Amino acid sequence: MKPTILAIITAMFLCNFACFSTRSGGNESTGTSGSKPLNTTDSSQNNITTTKKTDSTMNNTSKFPDLNKDAFKLHYDAIVIDTHNDILMPVFLEGADLNKNNPGTQSDIIKWKKGGLDVQMFSIYVPERYKSNDFKYVMKLIDKLEENQAENPESFALCTSYQELTAGLESGKFCALMGAEGGNMIEGSMENLETLYSRGVRYLGLTWNTSNAIGTSARDETERGKKGGLTDFGKDVVKRMNELGMLVDVSHLGETAFWDVVELSNAPIIASHSNCYSLAPHYRNLTDDQIKAIAKSGGYIGINFFYKFLDPNGNPGAIKNVQSKYRNAAKQFADEYGDDLVGFNEKRYEYIEENKVNSGTPIDVLIDHIDHIVQLVGIDYVGLGSDFDGSITTVNEMYDATCYPIITKKLVERGYKEEDIRKILGGNFMRVFKQVCSKP
């Protein structure tokens, strides 16, 4: 994106939304981000070429006989998908640049490509404090993603179907999908839901932390004692989403409303960014019965990287200290490896292993949540839903989006086969997306 064009677009957006800042209370935490514009650096431009990839995830793909040696090669060979990310908030409300390496964000195109990510599901989210004009706000967010594609047609593909997604991957482009978070944005209108779909949004999280015309949120049901599941309108929304080919996302949804969805939906159900209640009893996590129901529907659960949903005893201050140590060390040898991403990751992982700490929340806890789902319902229903840039503190080793390869290395160490790792990294979501979001 040319700097002049970017400056004009950013200025226009900030002019239209000058009264906005980041989420009230953050997306998942109680912290807030400041409204001071983020600095971007021009020194790390996108000079990393994305590998052309095909969806072979349903096959018994086995290219690397020695995974202990080639874990990072496997990572960059696999299709890697993240089903929830909030980068649009700092991009459009704080002046960050999606196409540059922003020191103030956990993710951007540069970090995604260094981390081997191929597909990002962008969260289309309206901050709760700005409940008026939700739908108009959402339309402007979608406009900006479409503008990004228009300005970067050779490298960025905004996809609306499985066919478009596979075509984008096969051409070596970074692929974007859109998922809406919080049914309040449709303002009680089925027509607005249909417009979201026509603009390319392919999942809708029925609630955020607050309830709406669709149903009761997990937070309201658990912390505020609000009763009720899906409303009559909410039931109609689920049915219409099934008809349209739009994924029903139950992350943030109250348990009563969850079971209403299970009863109503005739399509796979997803939780785009949720974890396991039995390991971390937080209202945002899924009980074992809920996990089984999602698997029975043929659905998908994207593991969230937020420490609170992984480790109830986690200390954010301790985590940030560890992350600062790991990030600074990686910066010292990044230039040495340049575009040799496998070499860079081997060196970074070696440093982490040689400098283990007993504080914070280690990535092993995140892998425990993956393990739990696999042991409970099988390998086919779990993936990654980081929640990067959602005002969250992630686990120690996952300080930003360059760190996805560490997950693959840890899965290898846990004894997962190549075929299964490919499913977790992206194949499981590809299966669901193909079933629900294919063109007729």
Image: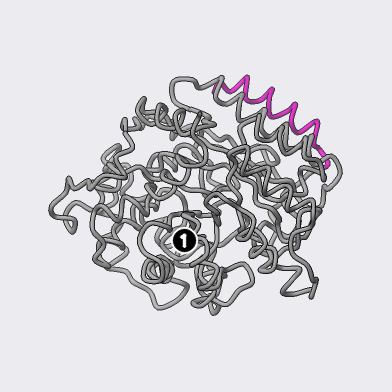
Name the quarter where the N terminus is drawn: top right
Which is nearer the eye, 238 or 136? 238
Residue 280: image location, x then y, percent: 53, 76
* 56 displayed left or right of 291: left
Residue 412: image location, x then y, percent: 25, 61
The residue shown at (38%, 31%) is 169
Indicate the secondary structure of the residue bearing disc 1: helix
Confirm whether the magenta stretch covers residue 5: yes
Residue 320: image location, x then y, percent: 51, 65
Residue 30: name its quadrant: bottom right
Tell me how many marks there are.
Answer: 1
Which residues, given as a range, are shown in magenta? 1-19
The residue shown at (78%, 67%) is 228
Residue 381: name its quadrant: bottom left
Which is nearer the eye, 407 or 177? 177
Question: Is residue 364 shown above or below 346?
Answer: below
Badge 1 amino acid:
Ala
Confirm whether the magenta stretch covers residue 304: no
Q: Residues within 10 Å of mark 1 (few under 14, many from 20)?
A: many
Residue 335: image location, x then y, percent: 32, 42
Residue with the mark numbered 1: 295
Magenta residues, dominant SS class: helix
Residue found at the far left of this picture:
65
- What is the basis of the colouring in this image? one colour
Which is nearer the eye, 276 or 239? 239
